[in-house]
């Protein structure tokens, strides 16, 4: 199974992306990690439109792939699926940044409620500074997606839940 791994915004998330890919590849999946363009430019400004097109092309070239996304990657895949009407096998979202997303980002994240909830698993640290479990459950109130939020026992924005990710993807 092909899995596309989308990291968080800053270049420090490259390590997480590489660890997830290495773990999934060692377990027999075919993981492809994305390095954001702004990392190579030494910039902290992401070109959202560029990354959205790039991600849409990658997903369309790999039909029925699964996605593992962290932080801004969760917003980008939500926007890609919404704008391009693309289909994926499963979605694993880690550290959804609901507290820091602008209105457009929240609109895209809200569109995830249209995806079959059995295809989505959300890992959210109970006190993630970019959005707690409570924040996320409140955002998805009234949606079956609320029941797919797994409260993880950390108070930061780190997501080392590789075994849990693998278990859902299989």
Image (tube, helix red, strand yellow):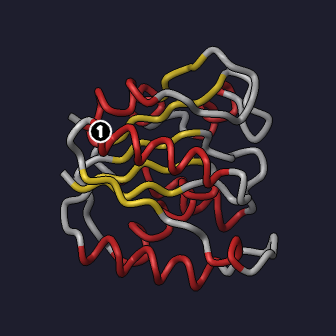
| Circle 1 residues within 10 Å: few <14, some 14–19, many ≥20 | few
Q: Is residue 14 above or below residue 144?
A: below
Residue at screen point 48% across, 60% down = 78
Q: Which residue is nearer to you in this view: 107 or 48?
A: 48
Q: Is residue 144 above or below residue 109?
A: above
The residue tagged 1 is: 26
Q: Position of residue 88 (x, y in %)?
A: 26, 58
Quick check: 76 left or right of 47? left
Residue at screen point 61% across, 54% down = 14
Q: Position of residue 126 (x, y in %)?
A: 67, 21
Q: Position of residue 166 (x, y in %)?
A: 32, 32
Quick check: 3 left or right of 43? left
Residue at screen point 61% across, 44% down = 96
Q: Which residue is nearer to you in this view: 6 or 133?
A: 6
Residue at screen point 56% across, 57% down = 73
Residue 27 quadrant? top left
Residue 22 quadrant? top left
């Amino acid at each position: 199974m092909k899995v596309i791994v989308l990291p968080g915004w800053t270049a420090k998330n490259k390590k997480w992306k590489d660890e997830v890919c290495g773990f999934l590849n060692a377990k027999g999946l075919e993981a492809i990690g994305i390095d954001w363009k702004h990392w190579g430019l030494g910039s902290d400004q992401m070109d959202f439109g560029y990354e959205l097109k790039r991600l849409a092309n990658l997903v369309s070239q790999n039909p029925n792939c699964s996605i593992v996304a962290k932080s801004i990657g969760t917003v980008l895949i939500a926007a890609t699926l919404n704008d391009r009407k693309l289909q994926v096998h499963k979605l694993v979202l880690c550290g959804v940044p609901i507290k820091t997303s602008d209105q457009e980002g929240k609109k895209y994240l809200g569109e995830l409620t249209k995806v079959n909830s059995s295809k989505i698993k959300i890992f959210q640290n109970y006190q993630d500074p970019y959005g707690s479990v409570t924040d996320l459950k409140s955002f998805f109130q009234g949606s079956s997606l609320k029941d797919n939020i797994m409260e993880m026992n950390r108070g930061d924005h780190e997501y080392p839940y590789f075994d849990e990710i693998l278990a859902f993807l299989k």
